[in-house]
Image: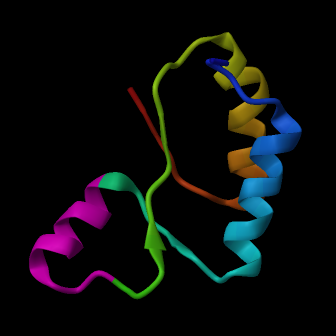
Amino acid sequence: AELYVPASFLERRFQILREEKINVLPLGDALDRLWAGTLPERAAAITFDDGNYDFLAKAHPLLAAYGYPATVY
């Protein structure tokens, strides 16, 4: 199984989130709102399993372009 996805694949996923009007929240905020019962409809949090150079070079610019927060483990 592949461990990485091409930037074009990731960007298409971000496009879908935007098209579907998904509320992308920082993970901490999403969890707090979930526990408080104030999570908006159609909410999501974006996480990445690693913070290697490919994240900085490929994913981070896409996140910035779409204005999406993410958590990197």
The verdict on residue 23 being magenta is no
Rendering quarter of residue 60: top right
Q: Front-most of 67 and 58?
A: 58
Q: Residue furthest right?
A: 8
* Image x and y of residue 8, in percent: 88, 41
What's drawn in magenta, residue-wise? 28-39
Residue 50 rendering spot, x and y as whole percentages: 49, 19
Q: Residue 41, position in %: x, y?
A: 41, 88
Magenta region, main secondary structure: helix
Against 14, is 10 above or below?
above
Quadrant location of the C terminus in the rendered image: top left
Asked whether, in this view, residue 71 is left or right of residue 38, the answer is: right
- On screen, 49 above or below 64? above
Looking at the image, residue 47 lies above or below residue 39: above
Which residue of the protein is positioned furthest toward the front in this rendering? Answer: 1
Residue drawn at x 71%, y 34% as measured from the top left: 59
Name the residue: 81% across, 43% down: 9
- Which of the two residues, 45 or 61, is positioned nearer the viewer here? 45
Residue 2 image-quadrant placement: top right
Query: Colour scheme used in the picture?
Result: rainbow
- In what quadrant of the picture does the N terminus appear? top right
Q: Is residue 18 left or right of residue 68?
A: right
Quarter of the rendering containing residue 66: bottom right
